[in-house]
């Protein structure tokens, strides 16, 4: 857990530093492609644009995965299908595979219009969905703290299981080797660079842009850390003993530890789905514009001042 917080802090600092440098280089440019037009020759600009496009895919892949894992149990709950939530490829019956196709159709329909300002208005409610999820994880964490004895070393955990079997004991490692999924998620979670240009240009007090962006990154770090800490305590608690989280670890999507017919989990999944669907739509729209700029630059050439 301590290693996870440290990694989150390091990624936050790195993301803020690179975002700050990008804003300094871009100056008054609203689109970073204009900045690259100025500083790079044609092929250097093309490589830079391609790197931005690939980086967008990091966030989109993560969001699409979470969206499909949220939509699948939502459909099971809505249709009353009584089956366990299995995140496997299975074309012989309704499964996550068909859910991915349904989700792709939804995203394509939402990104079909060129003007996606309606999505931005809906996305304004994303703060509400985030607060709901944060409150949910905090509640789970507090309940588990009241009913579970937590240990932070394997020796103490093994001793507690043998000496006091009547109480439920859980092991929380301070550091572990399986931290690569966290780094992959944070790579997209702190990605704000391209979108920050337009926000900075429309800011009411441009002289405070650096401070405001820094506060934003700190708040994101605090949110991630709060959810991470309370989530570790919550989902290793006695309520989830059947998953043996002290040995097999918490599932990458903690909501998969709830049954498909759980009403509270279905509501939380719906909130997350609505929030990420709007963000994914905006990302697809931005990705489309970047790809079109790259294609135009390669086929028609670029004129430099």
Image (cartoon, helix red, strand yellow):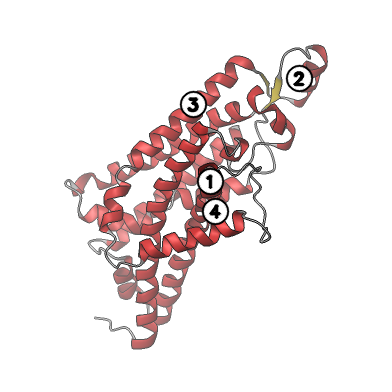
Residue drawn 64% across and 50% down? 87
Indicate which disc residue 156 carries: 2
Q: Which numbered disc, 4 or 3, marks the residue that appears first in the sequence?
A: 4
Q: Give the alpha-carbon distance from disc 4 to disc 3, as whole Å.
A: 24 Å
Q: 21 and 262: which one is in front? A: 262
Left or right, 26 with reference to 202: right
Q: Give the alpha-carbon distance from disc 3 to disc 2, as whole Å.
A: 26 Å
Estimate how packed mark 3 is, as few (under 14), some (14 to 19) or many (20 or more) residues with alpha carbons within 10 Å: many
Is 133 situated above or below 185?
above
Estimate how packed mark 1 is, as few (under 14), some (14 to 19) or many (20 or more) residues with alpha carbons within 10 Å: few
Of the residues tagged 1 and 3, which is closer to the observer?
Answer: 1
Q: SS class of the residue under badge 1?
A: helix
Q: Give the alpha-carbon distance from disc 2 to disc 1, as whole Å.
A: 46 Å
Q: 295 and 35: which one is in front? A: 295
Residue 267 x %, y %? 46, 36
Left or right, 261 with reference to 303: right
Q: Which numbered disc, 3 or 2, marks the residue that appears first in the sequence?
A: 3
Quadrant containing the N terminus is top right
Q: 301 and 80: which one is in front? A: 80
Is 274 situated above or below 222?
below
Is 128 situated above or below 51?
above
Residue 237 x %, y %? 64, 24
Q: Which residue is mark 4?
A: 65
Q: SS class of the residue under badge 4?
A: helix
């Amino acid at each position: 857990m301590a290693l996870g917080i440290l990694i989150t802090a390091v990624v936050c600092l790195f993301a803020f530093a690179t975002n700050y440098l990008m804003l300094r280089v871009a100056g008054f440019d609203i689109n970073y492609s204009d900045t690259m037009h100025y500083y790079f020759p044609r092929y250097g600009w093309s490589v830079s644009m391609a790197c931005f496009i690939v980086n967008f895919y990091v966030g989109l892949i993560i969001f699409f995965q979470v969206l499909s894992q949220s939509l699948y149990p939502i459909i099971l709950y809505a249709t009353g299908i009584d089956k366990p939530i299995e995140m496997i490829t299975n074309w012989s019956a309704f499964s996550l595979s068909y859910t991915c196709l349904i989700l792709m159709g939804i995203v394509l329909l939402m990104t079909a219009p060129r003007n996606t300002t309606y999505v931005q208005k809906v996305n304004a409610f994303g703060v509400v969905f985030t607060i709901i999820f944060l409150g949910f994880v905090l509640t789970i964490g507090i309940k588990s703290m009241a009913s579970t004895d937590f240990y932070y070393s394997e020796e103490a955990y093994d001793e507690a299981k043998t000496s006091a079997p009547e109480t439920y004991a859980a092991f929380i490692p301070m550091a572990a080797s399986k931290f690569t999924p966290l780094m992959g998620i944070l790579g997209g979670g702190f990605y704000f660079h391209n979108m920050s240009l337009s926000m900075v240009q429309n800011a009411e007090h441009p002289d405070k842009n650096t401070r405001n962006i820094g506060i934003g990154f700190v708040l994101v770090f605090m949110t991630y850390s709060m959810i991470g800490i309370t989530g570790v305590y919550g989902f290793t608690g006695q309520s989830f003993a059947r998953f043996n989280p002290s040995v097999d670890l918490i599932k990458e999507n903690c909501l998969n530890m709830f049954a498909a017919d759980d009403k509270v989990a279905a509501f939380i999944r719906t909130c997350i789905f609505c929030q990420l669907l709007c963000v994914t739509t905006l990302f697809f729209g931005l990705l489309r514009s970047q790809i079109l700029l790259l294609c135009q630059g390669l086929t028609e050439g670029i004129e430099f001042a």
